[in-house]
Image (tube, helix red, strand yellow):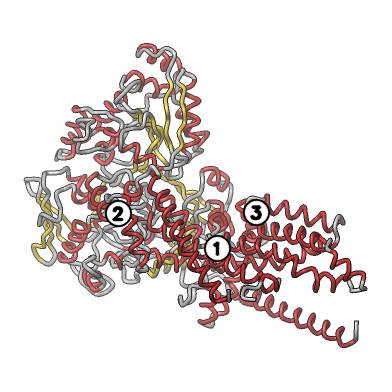
Amino acid sequence: MNLATYILRRLALMIVVLFGVLVITFLVSHVIPADPVVAALGSQAPDYLIQKVRHEWGLDLPLQQQFINYMWDVLHGDLGISIRTNRPVAEDLLQYFPATIELSTTAIIMAVLLSIPLGIISAVRRNKLSDHLTRVFSIFGISMPVFWLGLLLLAALYFRLHILPGPGQLSFQVSPPPRVTGFLTIDSLLAGDLGAFFNYLSHLILPAFVLGFASLASITRITRSSMLEVLRQDYIRTARAKGLSSRVVINRHALKNALIPTTTVIGLRYGSLLEGAVLTETIFAWPGVGLYVVGAILFLDFPAIMGSVLAIAVVYSVVNLVVDLVYGFLDPRMRIGD
Amino acid sequence: MSKRKAITKIQSAVIAVVLIAIIVGAYFYYASQLAPVQKPVTLVIAMDTSSIVSLDPAKAYEFESVLIDNNVYNKLVSFKGTDYSTVYPELADSWTVASDGMTWTFNLKHGLTFPSGTPINAAAVVYSFQRIVQLQQPPSWVITKFGITNKTNAVTALDDYTVQIKLNAPYAKGLFLACLAFPVASIVDPTVVKAHETKGDMGGGWLLDHGAGSGAFTIQEWQRGAQIVLNANKNYWKGKPGVDTILIKELKESLDQRMLLERGDVDIAWNLLSDQIQSLKSNNDITITSVPSFSVIYVGMNAGSKPFNDPKVREAVRWAIDYNGIINDILKGSATGLQTIIPKGIAGYDPQAPFTQDIAKAKSLLADAGYPNGFTVDLTTPASISGAPTADIAAKIKSDLAKVGITVNIQLLTYAELLVKYRAQSLQMMIGRWGSDYADPDSNAAAFALCRTTGPTDTAKQLAWRNKYANNATSDLVQKAVKELDDTQRMNDYKQITTTILHDGPFALLFQQVYQRAVRNTVKGFTVSPLTLEDFSTITKQT
């Protein structure tokens, strides 16, 4: 099977997965014992208004008809109108996803740049002080509630020491650049507004670190354990016996194989970060998709819930596909099409 | 290592160091350029605006959207400062009521215009009311309840500056005027709105996040999830506002709001918790401004079945609750005592507060009612309502009622789930909130005391109905008071209603919420409103 065929096959499977996700999400959101109309209109709304709005939203139709109508719209590219924001769900997602993508991407890059060297050092210096410190650090990172870490760092680095800015994407003195792509980094560069660019980066550091911290810890652990596994292999012993330096053995012979399980974890972590991290977004006032989805759930905003889940499922599927393709780069035996 | 490799490594290290130095240097250079803004004067408010659905006054029904519309639009009449007992002229200069009590004539001020140049005249008023009754959005009932609907020609222009409104009955003057002072009755610029009309939406799609008013501020933009930017209307007919720009920054987390306030990066923190407010009282740079709101928290008891069908049991519950403990220990200043159904600040407020925790009395009442050993009951509540920690309050009530032998099982639900069950009359006991929509006693009296039948045919279906409490006497008084043209007699009617519900109703009123805002001392002229109708035009800021 060649690469193009493989990708097409995976995309076809993705459609099946997305359909299943939509069915489950639809059923779950519609069996919740709450009324989105009453939730939207409030406790004081008169009955006639509730009936009117329920009819407008199509919620008085049979469940299967509601689902068919929704699927028909989705097939025509219409994710519906958000009950909460009164805007097309697609427009909302385009509004909120870029912030999450920038935050998650920065978080995973920070995590990867720190965790892989830490994992290697920890494996190579097994049971030495640096290994113990790294392992404690990993446990700390996995166990630390992200909201607590975020508030702690904000209190220390912003409130007390004022070396990093407070919550939000930009300082209030900075006007946001004209929206072109929705990515503030790109839009500020396109507008030639370096002030906004660097101000945004300064606001991005802390939430990205907080968000990436748990990933950093888990990637460090998996890198350490897979490196240890690889370093025990016969071919590594052979390489050492041939007189190759430790640096050559690790970088040229061990690392690529050790990175295979690490790549899986990185992919899974990145996918989960792209779902939106509602706690980080809440603490740092980051207008991302996590806040949007949680707001939709609390508001019983069915179109937004369905559209968001669909978008997240697509993101996850694409990330998994990319991870599978990266395997081929790391291990020729896993290359598709060979 | 060969010499060539060593040089390459050194070169790489130098390049890396130089790159890092450039990036760090640029960061600090640009960061240093962001000096505090001197002009224009910007007021920064940290607020949880996540509940805002629309800024269209015909649709806005959340606290925050109504607050913004109050500053972007004008109405025929308005309240002034913290006085909610009297309505004052705003776009209307004066008004008269015909002897039938149903025909109102409003004389508009001459010479006022919208920022677009369109005159504020009778045609604008008529159009604005047409939007309310045709769009029929959530707050529209505040106006349509007077018979002003899309089927009647109730609002007409007699001439360019005279508007006539015909009601379907002779309503109490204070009631109708209080409803006209609610932001749903805002007057919009018909020229601007019609220019942005799409598919017959009467401009609703555009007004979602734009403004078309004559108020002190205009909406520059709403960056969802980030901030709402208001600019001063420099030609505001009441006088130029004291600040040039208002940034309402979206911040859900109260700790964030507090940190930003203490650092001086925001001027007003809107949603601080009561313990945060308490700790800020010792901060010399910050002032806490507060007012009892028109929002009340209550316990509802389903009078349709045992045990709460017996008034003695309901009275026993009222005597068992430790109100002071709730207000002082849990709410710590963010509440004030209220045991009658009309909150302080609204005409008709009754200061009676006979209930204090009296375990012996409560037990005696229960014994008389045939429950000497108490009973078991489910108490349903959300974790919090509008900032009030109702889960904690439920735990306190559980402990209080245990002392008289009542075993309480707390059921935690989201507010959306609770409302469904509440509207289905299926909750045995619950904690809820009622916020007055307008500053008139009818808003609360109708909710707590108007119910003629607990069956499906009742027309009101508000709180009394949801707790299966029908009372023809109080219902008669509520419906009489709505149309009572004699103010003294009207207040007597409400006195009778509040006294009856106090001892017979299916409610135990716990407290009236106090709105507390933390404000930096550089900000002057800010007054908290019990209806979240703050007037930002009076605010100034020292820079």
Q: How packed is label 2: few (under 14 Cα within 10 Å), some, or many (20 or more)?
A: few
The reply to whether dot 3 and dot 2 touch (C-beta < 8 Å) is no
Q: Residue furthest bottom?
A: B4
Mark 2 lies on a secondary structure that is: helix
For residue A58, above or below residue B26 = above
Task: Give the amino acid type for the residue marked by disc 3 in the picture.
Answer: Leu
> Which residue is located at x 26 percent, y 48 percent?
A50
Q: Residue furthest left?
A: B99
Disc 3/disc 2 C-alpha distance (Å): 46 Å
Task: Give the amino acid type for the residue marked by disc 2 in the picture.
Answer: Gln
Q: Which mark is residue A16?
A: none
Q: Position of residue A230 (x, y in %)?
A: 80, 63
Q: Residue furthest front?
A: A1
The reply to whether dot 1 and dot 2 touch (C-beta < 8 Å) is no
Tell which of B189 and B58 is nearer to you. B58
N-terminal of the two: label 1 or label 3?
Answer: 3
> Which residue is located at x 34 percent, y 18 percent?
B312
Q: Chain of mark 2?
A: A
Pointer 1 residue: A274
Pointer 2 residue: A65
Q: Position of residue B147 (x, y in %)?
A: 14, 49
Disc 1/disc 2 C-alpha distance (Å): 32 Å
N-terminal of the two: label 3 or label 2?
Answer: 2
The reply to whether dot 1 and dot 3 touch (C-beta < 8 Å) is no
Task: Give the amino acid type for the residue marked by disc 1 in the picture.
Answer: Leu
Pointer 3 residue: A149
Tell which of A338 and B300 is nearer to you. A338
